[in-house]
Each structure stands twice: as C-alpha cells, then as structure tokens.
Image (cartoon, rainbow, N blue to C red):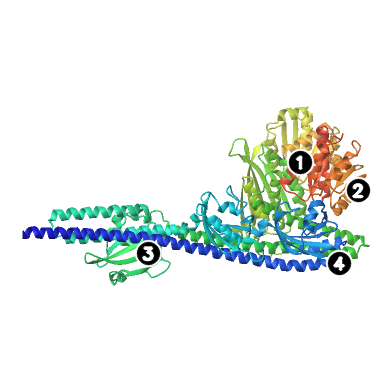
Amino acid sequence: MNVEGTEREKNKRYYVVNFLICVCIALILGAGVAYIVILRSNLMEQTIGNVLNVTRQQQQSFDTFISADRERLHSYATYFSHTDSKDTAGVREKLKVFSEIDAYYSVINLETGEYCNNKSEQVFLMQGDELEVYRSLTGADIRDPYPGLYSGSTAFGYYERFEFADGVQGLFQKAYESEEVSEEFSLSFYNGQGRGYIVSREGEILMRSNGEKDKYSYNNLFDMVVSADDTEGGGEEFIEMLRNRKTGTAVFENIQGEQICTYVPVENVEGWYLISVVPVSAVMEEADEIIKNSQFTIIFLGVVMMFFTGCLFLNWRSHKEISKKDQEIEYNKQQFDIFSTYLSNNTDDVYIMLNSRERRVEYVSSNVVRVLGVSVEDVLKDIRIFGRAKYCSGKHVEFTDLEAMEPGDSFEPVMSERIHAKTGQHRWFWETVYSVLIQGEKKIVVYLSDRTRERETQNTLTQALDLARVANKAKSTFLSSVSHDIRTPMNAIMGLVTLLSQEADNPERVLEYTQRINAASQHLLGLINDVLDMNKIEGGNATLNISEVNMAEVIEELNVIIRPQSKAKDQNFRIFASSFTHERLLGDKLRINQVLINILSNAVKYTQEGGCIELNVCELPGVTEGYSRVEFVIRDNGQGMSPDYLEVIFQPFTREEGSATREIQGTGLGMAITKSLVDLMGGSIEVESELGVGTTFTLDLDLRNCEDDEDDLAFWERHGVRRMLVADDDEYVCQNIVKAMKHTGVDIRYTTSGKKVVEMMRTARERGEPYDVMILDWKMPGFDGMETARLIRKNYPVKIPILFFTSFDWSEIEEEALEVGVNNFLTKPFFMHSFKEAVERLMDSGKDKLERTDSQAESVFAGKHILVVDDIEVNRLILVKILESLGAAVCDIAKDGQEAVDMFNSSSAGEYDVIFMDVQMPVLDGYGATRAIRVSGHPSAKSVPIIAMTANAFMDDIRDALESGMDAHVSKPVVVDQLKSTFQEVLERKRQYGGS
C-alpha cells in the first residue's frame, strides 16, 4: 500500500508540474499577444497625432501665405488708384514692377473692360459674361480656384476693388497657378503616399497636392469618405465635423483601402479646410516592422523559456531510468532545433549563446551563414571568426565585461557595422547582450538584430540631401555666373547707345559704336542660346533632326566660321581629311556643327596669338553594317588644362580658374552642352590636355551611309574627264586624292613641283593624251601656283580648267588668280563632293561660280514685293529697313496672322514674292496663318514662299514651322547673310521642283 501511495504521489506531482508548465506558456503567449495589440494601438494613435501636427503646420504656413498676400494686395490697389482710368499706358508701366514675379498681377477697368497684366505687353478687352464675372466681385476677397482667362490653367488668387483717380471703378487681382499654391501644403512624408487637399465646406476639392492624380482621384472629398463600406456612419460624422469648422481626425475605408484623415480649418478663408489623407498601410509600415520584430523576440523568449522549463523538468525527472531520460532530452533538443530553424529561416537576426567563463560559443543560429557569411562550425570553434566590428554608438563590450555580468543583467543595445565574409557587403546590427542562468550555470545570450535596410535607407536620404545641396550650390553659381556674363554685354550696349546718341553727327563714331553694339549683342545672344540649350537638354526635351549630312559642306562651313577667328589672332588653322569613301551620311548636321564649333571656338579662345590649331577628320570602319565611324581630332598648342579641371570639364557651370582664363567670358556650359549632344547622338568624346602644352579632343560619331545618286564612272564620262593632273608640294595630299578617285576610272598623275607641271603637260600633249582638268596648289616652295598657272596659260592657248587648291582664305588673291587664268577655287581638304560640284560647274557652263554667286546674292531681294508679318513694331521696322537696303521694291506690313491672311487673299496672283511670318502673335499665330494661306484657294497659295522669323530657335520649332507649311526658318535676331542665303535656297528649291 505504501508503495502504491508513493507512486500515486509521484504521478500527482508529475501532472501538477505539467499543468503549471502549460499555464506558464499560456500566460507568456497571452501576455505577448496583449503586448502586441497594445503596442499596435499606441503606435497607431501616436502616428495619427503626428499626421495631425503636420497638417496643423501646413495650415499655419498656408494661413501665413494668404494673410501676407492679402495685406500686400491692398497696398497694390492703392498704388493703382492714383492712376487715371484712361491712362492705359500708365497702368501697363506700373505693372512692369511685377514683370519678374511668377504670379499674375492684373488690373481691370470695370467700365471699359480693358484688362492688363504683368505677363503681357498687350491690352485685352473683355466683354459679355467674361466682364460681368469681374463686375460682380465686390470689396476685397479670395476667389475660389477658377479657369485662368488667358493662361489656360486653373488659377487661385485675391482681388480688391478700387477707384481710379477719375472715379471709375477698377479691380486689382493677384493670381497664382494652382500648382504653385499647392506646394504650400503638399505632403512629402510616408514615401510620397500622403495627400493634401484644400476643400470647401461642401467637400468640393479646390486644390490638391502636386502630383496627386490617379485613377482613384475624387472631385469631392465626401465621395472619398462616404462609401459602401461605411456601415458605422463614421463618414457622416466626419462630414458634420467638417461643416462645423472643427479640428480632428477620422479613419475610414474606401476603394483604396483604410485611410487616416486629419482636418484643420483655414483661419483666413471662411469655409475652407486643409485636409491630409494618408493610407493606414503607409502609416503602419514602420510600426508593422517593429511589431514583427517584437513577435519574433517573444517567440524566441518563449522558446528559451520552454527550453529552460524542459531542462528543469528533465532535472526533476532525473530519478527516472537513464534511457528514458536520454530520450526526453533528445526530444526537447529536437523541439528547440525546430523553433530555432524557423527563426533562422524567417529573420536576419542572429542569436549566439556563450559560456563566458570558458569564452566558448555553445550555440549560434544557422542563419549566420546567410547573414554574415561564416559557417556555424567555424563560429563554434572560435568566435573571433566574426572579426572586429566597427561600433557606431554605445559601449563596446569585452569578455571581461561579460564575466562581470550577473544573471538578469543586460547591456544597452549598441549599433555595430560588420562586413559579410563572402560578399564584402557592409551590414549594420543592433547588438544586445543578456545574462541568464541555465541549470545553475550562467550563460550569455548575444542578439544581433539586422538593421542594414534601415541604415541603407538613411544613407540614401543623406546622399539625396547632399545632392540637393550640391544642386543648390550649382544653381547659385550658375545664377551668379549668368547674371555677371549677361550684365557685361548689356552694360556695354547701354553705354554705347548713350554715346551713340551724343555723337550722332560723327559718322566715324557712329560706325564704330554700331560695330561694338553688334559684337556685344552677338555675345549676349550666344549666352542666351547656351542657357536655353542646357535647359532643354537637362529637361530631356532635346531631339535630333536626322537628314543628309555632306561632310564636305560640314568642313567648309567650319572653315568659314573658324578661320576668321583664328586669323584675327594670327593663328595657323589647318584642316586635314583622309580615307573618306562615304562623304554623304545621315545625322543631325546642326548638332554636329554645334559640337565642333564649340570645341574649335574654345581652341581659338584659349590658344595664344601665333599658335596652331588642327582639325583632322577621317572615316573609320563602322561597327555596324551600313554605318561609318567619323573621327574628328582637334589639337591645339594653347594654354592647356589642369588635371583637376579635366575631371569636371563636362559638368555644367565649371570653368578653368587661372589668370590666363579669367578675362575670357563664358557661362561654363559649352562643354556640358557638347558632351550632352554627343551622348544624344550616340557618340563618344575624349580629352587630353597638359598645362602649357596644349589640348586634344577626339570625337567619334557612328553615322548611317547614304546611297550614291550616280555611278562614279558615269559621272566622269558624262563630263569628259578622263585624265587629271594634281600638283601639291605635300605628297600625302596627292596620294589622298589618288586614293579618293580610285573607283572613278580617271587616270590621275601628280607631282610635288610647280616646275615639273609644265613639263608633264608638254609630254602628255606629245603623246596625244592631254589632261582634261588640273588641281594646282596655291602655295608651293620655289615655283608657286600663281606662277605655274601663268606659264600654263602662256604656253598652252587651249584652256585646261585649273582649280586652285588651298587651305587658306583665297579672297586676297582672287583677283590676281582670275587674271592669270585660274577658273575656280577648291578648298582643302579634298572631298569628292566638292570636286564634283566644281567639275560640273566648269564643264557644263564654263562660268565661274564666284561671279554668279556674288551677283545672285546682291540681287536676291532686288525688286521684290514682300509681306512682313510681326506684332512687334520694332521688329517690323528693323526687318523692313534691312529688306529695303537689300533692294526690295515694296514691303507691306501685317500686325497679326489674321491680317496677313486677309491681305494675301485680297492680293493678285504672284503679287507677293515672299512672306516673312512671325510665329507668336495675337488673334492668329504664324502657324495658323500659314495653314490658312495654303488652303485659301488663292492662285499663289501653294507657291508663295513663306519663311518663319521667330526667336524660337530649337529643332522642334523648325520642325513645327515646316509642318505648318512654311518653306524655311530664320531665327531672330536677323542676320543679313543668313536672311539672303535662306531666301536664295528657297528660290532654288522652288525652281527645281516647279514652284510647289
């Protein structure tokens, strides 16, 4: 009986212990769940409070914004009340005070309907309902957002009625684009998911955060709040609070999910509310991360407690037989392994258990391989395998500190930086150390909570802030640079105009001042074009206009532009070209010229007087079939650049700083524009430079080949060229010509001596195989080209066409060359296209192009009847005077597009020889006027040349002009040579295609 009683007592104790263990586990789990629920509720309440505080701050900022504006509005109304209502010019003059301000300032004469604003020189006349809207406004107040009368977008603003000096009622109004006002209350937290609204008492959304427009956007806030899911009436309670001008918060659910709404009345506008709406998912994103970590921590602690409880239970059952005890220990170990494996696979948090006395690792979670790149076995062998961490905050714990800990002690969490052993990735952890007692022995638990993602986010934000600061500094530098550079030519122009008015009776001074004003104006125009180009490129709006590019024309135009600049500094400018088998390519000729002119102009500016500048152009095999790679190498022996500047040469607003460059004007945008355009064209650009030695730019462009219009053999046979003689003292030049003419079937002989030319001609005639054309270098040592040509004409009466081949400006020898019998000039380097044109002119007509071109240029406007269309009087005056100076017979004037259409329709067939059309005009713009003319049915509607003349000079503007029906585009300000050449090209196209 005693034995049975003892056994029953043991069983009773066994069940009691198990029951207590279950109760403890249940209490722990219950406490964990309650803690998580309370934590979530507190975080939600705290976050809603934060959103409400932000909304209040936005409301105070918006109220301050409105209050300050309304105070200033009254002062401005008083300012205009001293003006007579009929003094429209005086009103416009006063409005100029606001011309540099982004807001729209308007003055309305409520009696006549005259409307003036600070953004336009024009006076608009309002009538009917439009005028009645403004007459209905009384006193001074704020207008609800309304469609702008002339801006075309939603506006917001204030007004105040006043009396002009003569008693007539007027109204002064200040308006903003609604998007600008929206910036005063736009939310920028919770990763941009927060939205802000200005609403009326009836819930109408008057303004919304910038960028807040998606498929779920509402026009009335009540539609967002009251939905099918609003079963508890929370939405109706919120609407009632709003109508009673209360401040508070609400949580509702709509099609976009559960939303937090905070609302604050706008103090300075009756019936307006500032409302912030944030998705609960965005607000609770960070809280959910905290809760998740807490859940895993609770689970871990539960597992640890279960482990400890199991150990106690096993100790209590130590009297059991050894085999049973071993089985129970193994079972609990497996349980622990299961839970630890679950934690390791689902978190990036690492757990380590240490025996501080033996300084030995007893346990480490298996995810240490993934998180830190070291194996569990290596850590168990030696904890130093982790390496030494870099501690960013808190105290670094040593082993001596661990040994001094008592059970229940812990250290404050510290932030550490560790490096992944395999990937080298930097990772950040919160390290927490606990001391616990297990089976009577002290153990140390180290908890490494991964915070890498949070740290990287913080670093990203820091970098973004640094970039914003750099951008702001660059903007300030840019404004300072541009302000200085623009004021310099402007001051020169204003000063010279003053001197011009004082010495108008001195023709020499007038001519000198006019030339200087023109130079300053051209410099100012270049600065403005650079700024506009950079703005368009950075805005991603730069485009390419792909058309045929003739490399001969590109080089010739560069020569015409750069050679006068280099000649003015007595520099030696040389151009070399070689290996061209495809001279006609497809690309953006304007952009290619812009890049090359930028580089060459800089080479001229930064190379000393008497220096040397070279442009080498060659064709390389293309990487893609059907393409050629054109390489431009530009060298100079100028000042060179420092290594530091070479690192930033292609960044905007950067310039080499030094005594030699300080006096050279510029915005620091040229090279940035050049690099951006090269990237846009898919090319590459490299630069090498050394101070005091010089600079080399290498530009590579891949351009598509054009198909040849005519077989080379057929061309030369048709023009009777079978044999040709080339004379140049540079044998490389001669060999390059022979190589370029390889497939033409022409027999080419060359010599490097002027004296030998006459002998070769005599020998050829004796064989009965005279030369059909000759290319003769102008400058050769000993016997130069001029003397050689004179001997040829003296000894051979039958004229062989002679082309002077020169890389220099031949205008100084043109008259003498024509007298000795030279037929035409060919500019180095040699291009097949240029040579073909010269041969075609000489063989077909026998006339000198120089004489014909000059006469055509002189007479292109002679006797023409021209229609000038422009809404600006000074522009009309300048253009008419220029055209009259060029020989125009009659210049009619139209002040807008509609007037131009009426004048054209009332003209007789062929009365107008050309129409110069401005683009931006009132009533009807230039594009609309051109389309109306082209479809008018007038006999000359399709054939009359129409040329756009506008300050809009981008490629998109040129394309728009051509698509509207115009024949060409000339940018303002007017350049006489460009005006003449453009009209000449239009006339030639009209003749070539039959006038259509």
**Sequence-wise first label, 2 or 1:** 2
Q: Is residue 588 visible?
A: yes
Q: CA distance from mark 4 to mark 2?
A: 46 Å
Between 38 and 232, the one nearer to me in the picture: 232
Disc 4 packing (10 Å; few <14; some 14–19; many ≥20): some
Q: Residue at x 32, y 66 (%)?
A: 434
Between 712 and 398, the one nearer to me in the picture: 398
x%, y% of residue 766? 79, 29
The amino acid at mark 3 is Glu
What residue is disc 4 on? Answer: 165
Q: Is residue 283 left or right of residue 444?
A: right
Task: Locate residue 429: give its quadrant.
Answer: bottom left
- On residue 431, the disc is 3
- Determine the secondary structure under disc 1: helix
What residue is disc 1 on? Answer: 962
Q: CA distance from mark 4 to mark 1?
A: 50 Å
The amino acid at mark 1 is Leu
Q: Residue at x 70, y 39 (%)?
A: 547
From the image, state whether disc 3 or disc 1 is nearer to you.
3
x%, y% of residue 292? 40, 57
- On residue 560, the disc is none
Asked if labels 1 and 2 touch by Cβ distance under 8 angstroms, the answer is no
